[in-house]
Amino acid sequence: MPTSALGPSRPTLHLPLLDEDQEEFDSPETIEALADVLRSFGHDVDLLGEGEPMLRRLLDGPRPDLVLNFAEGQGIGRSREARVPAVLEMLGVPYTGSDPLTLAVTLDKDCAKRLVTAAGVATPRWTLVRDGESFDAVAPVFAGLTPPLIVKPAYEGSSKGVRSTSLIHRREDLPAALTLARQTYRQPVLVEEFIDGNELTVGMVGNQPPEILGVMRILPRQADGPFLYSLEVKRDFERLVRYECPAQLSAADTRAVRHAAFAAWQALGCRDVARLDFRLRNHVPYFLEANPLPGLSPKSGDLVIMARLVGVEYPELIRRILETALRRLQMADAPSAPRRGGRRSRLPTGATV
């Protein structure tokens, strides 16, 4: 009887989302929503756990037919999102989504920007301040950047470390911002020019080529200065922003964004599903970052909101992700048709689903 599994969800299910350390991890409600959708397709669903418990279950128990991987991983290393798929590849267990290399390079913002730049995609000018580098050593590089600037940790996702205070308008405020980011996140810090333009996110599902699910614009409900899609905004999104999909852009701008999204997807080696963030200024889309593990909260996930705005409901979105992975894996059975005694779907829980 086939199996599918979800990637690790948060290890401690009782911590509130006010704890930034838990920001990347999906809630128990999201995990259960995904499990319910898989069950509606006729699958048996197992939650695999995280870390050593997950390893023991995979080694000692029946192997899943497919793992639906949205495992973020714990800690601050740039390879933490690659751990679960690396283990699955070692054990020969098929899974959805991008491979370990893509998950590592997209989490490393400096590396991702270098790759998309080499592919001809614009990105805000930036510099990386490495561990141990003094401000004086990198000051000449900062002189080439035009404020306002964004200061953020280099190896984080889900807007961790991107707050209203991350937007620096005066060069003299940079040393304090760098010190705070280093002390808080204990990793290199990325400093990049702030692009004051349309905030866009592009959802993509599929392979060779992927399908663009939508180009969504995030608009502040109150325009009182430069808009930053920060952690505070995302936590209070219903009150602070509205979402527009399809984004009301000119045909030429839409083509430019789509072209940049395809080029970035290919340069980063994404598979099955990803969400790519851009800023559009003067008809030029600037790549910000890619998320090959997009949040799947039925309420607040940007990819889910985008899908809903273009008429794709939650179960259909999950079905598309699964089916594109199955086609890539050349697995004959599609997950969408309910069946008696269905397939087993393993959902890893412990870092994120």
Image: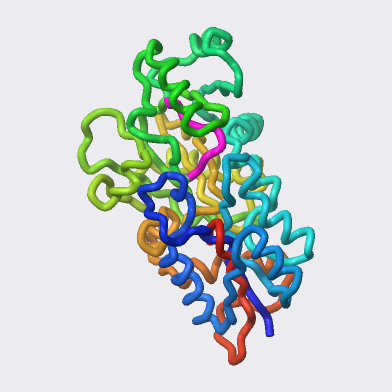
Q: Which of 35 and 302 is in front in this view?
A: 35
Residue 157 horizontal side relative to residue 233, left or right = right
| Rendered-image quadrant of the N terminus | bottom right
Q: Nearer the viewer, residue 100 or 72?
A: 72
The answer to whether any part of residue 180 appears in the image is yes
Query: Residue 324 at x, y = what percent?
Result: 62, 65
Q: Nearer the viewer, residue 22 or 39?
A: 22
Q: Nearer the viewer, residue 316 or 67?
A: 67
Count all numbered tags in the image, as a single digit: 0
Location of residue 267 by image quarter: top right
| Residue interval drawn in magenta | 150-157
Q: Which residue is drawn at 41% across and 27% down?
A: 195
The answer to whether any part of residue 296 appears in the image is no
Is residue 326 located in the magenta-colored stretch of the structure?
no
| Residue placed furthest toward the bottom | 340
Residue 309 horizontal side relative to residue 273, left or right = left
Q: Which residue is drawn at 72% across and 77% down?
A: 62
Classify 235 as above or below 305: above
Query: Residue 298 at x, y = what percent?
Result: 40, 64
Classify 34 as above or below 173: below
Q: Which residue is drawn at 63% across and 47% down?
A: 80
Q: Which colour scheme is used?
A: rainbow
Query: Residue 260 at x, y = what percent?
Result: 54, 39
Is residue 152 located in the magenta-colored stretch of the structure?
yes
Q: Which residue is drawn at 78% across and 63% down?
A: 91
Query: Residue 153 at x, y = what percent?
Result: 51, 32
Location of residue 206 by image quarter: bottom right
